[in-house]
Amino acid sequence: MNENIFNKKGYNTLSLLIVLGAVLVLSGLLLLAFNIGWLNPALKSIVFSWPMLFVLFAVIGFVKRQRLISVIFLLLGLFFLLPRLETVYPGILGEAGKEFTSNYWPLLLIVIGLMIIIAVAINRKKKVPFRNDIVNKQSNTDGWIVKDVIFGGSESVFLEPIFKGGKIDVVFGGVVLDLRKTTLPETTVYLNIDVVFGGVTIYIPENWSVKSDIDSVFGGYSDKRVNVVVSDDKSDSKLVLQGTLIFSGCTVQ
C-alpha cells in the first residue's frame, strides 16, 4: 500500500480556500444586490442568518466527500430556514407554517436516524477502500490501522512492530488508540482523522516527532505530552496527523 494515498492535505486545503473564496464572492454579490434593490431586502435576514452556517458546513463536507454529515447539515439548515421564509412570504408553508419548528422538529430525528441506519447497512454490505484503486485493509494489520466508529466507542493498543499509518473515522463516538508499543519507520507516516461530534485520544511516545495538519470547525487539537518533540519537516521519521474535526476534539498524550 502506498502511504501517499493518505497525504491529501494539499487537496483539502486548496478545496477549502476555493470554497472560502466562493463564499466571499457570493456574499459580496448578494449584499450588492440587496443594497441596490435587485433582491427583496426582507430576504437579507434569511440569507445572512445562523441557519445558513449549516448550509456552509454542508458545502465544506461535500468538498471533503463526507456525504452523510453534509446531508445532515443541509437538512438542518433548510429546516430552520423554512420558518424564516414563511415570515417573508406568508402562507408559503400553508397550515404547516404555524409553529413549524416546534411542531415538526421530530421529523429531523426520524430522517437523520433513517439516514444513519441506511448508511451503516450499506457500509456493512460493501467495504469501501481508501481509494478506488487500493485494496481495503483490515483493522490493525500489516502496520496499518483502520477504524470506522458510528455511535460507539473503541479502545485499542497497536501491537504491530512498525506503524505505517491509516485512517480513523468517527461519527458521534470516541476512539482511544495507544501507539506506545510500536515504532515509526524512517519516513513520514500519515494518519487521517475525520471526526464529527466525537473525540479521539492517541497515546504517542514522547520521542516521536508529530505534526498536526488537522482542520477544525468548532473543534480542537492538543498535544499534552510532557516532553514534546518539535516537528522538523526535514526529519526522516515523523507522524503527520491530518483530517477534519467538526464539533470534535483530538488529543495526543
Image: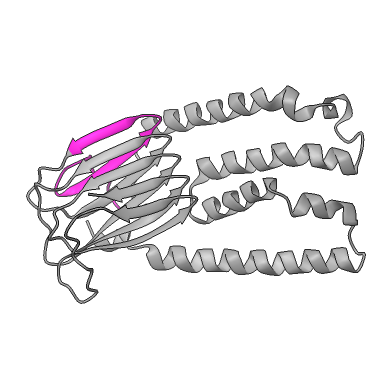
Give the vertical position of 76 relative to 60 (above or below): above
The residue located at (32%, 61%) in the rendering is 212
Looking at the rendering, the stretch of residues picked out in magenta corresponds to 133-156
Left or right: residue 122 versus residue 204 is right
Rendering coords of residue 44 (x, y %): 82, 55
Quadrant housing residue 19: bottom right
Instruction: Give the quarter of the figure containing the N terminus.
Output: bottom left
Left or right: residue 156 versus residue 117 is left
Rendering coords of residue 100 (x, y %): 78, 28
Magenta stretch encompasses residue 239: no
Magenta stretch encompasses residue 154: yes
Quadrant housing residue 241: bottom left
The residue located at (64%, 50%) in the rendering is 53
Q: How is the image coloured?
A: one colour
> Which residue ends up furthest to the front in the rendered image?
226
Q: How many marks?
A: 0
Asked if residue 133 can be seen in this view, the reply is no
Left or right: residue 208 versus residue 19 is left
> Which residue ends up furthest to the left in the rendered image?
161
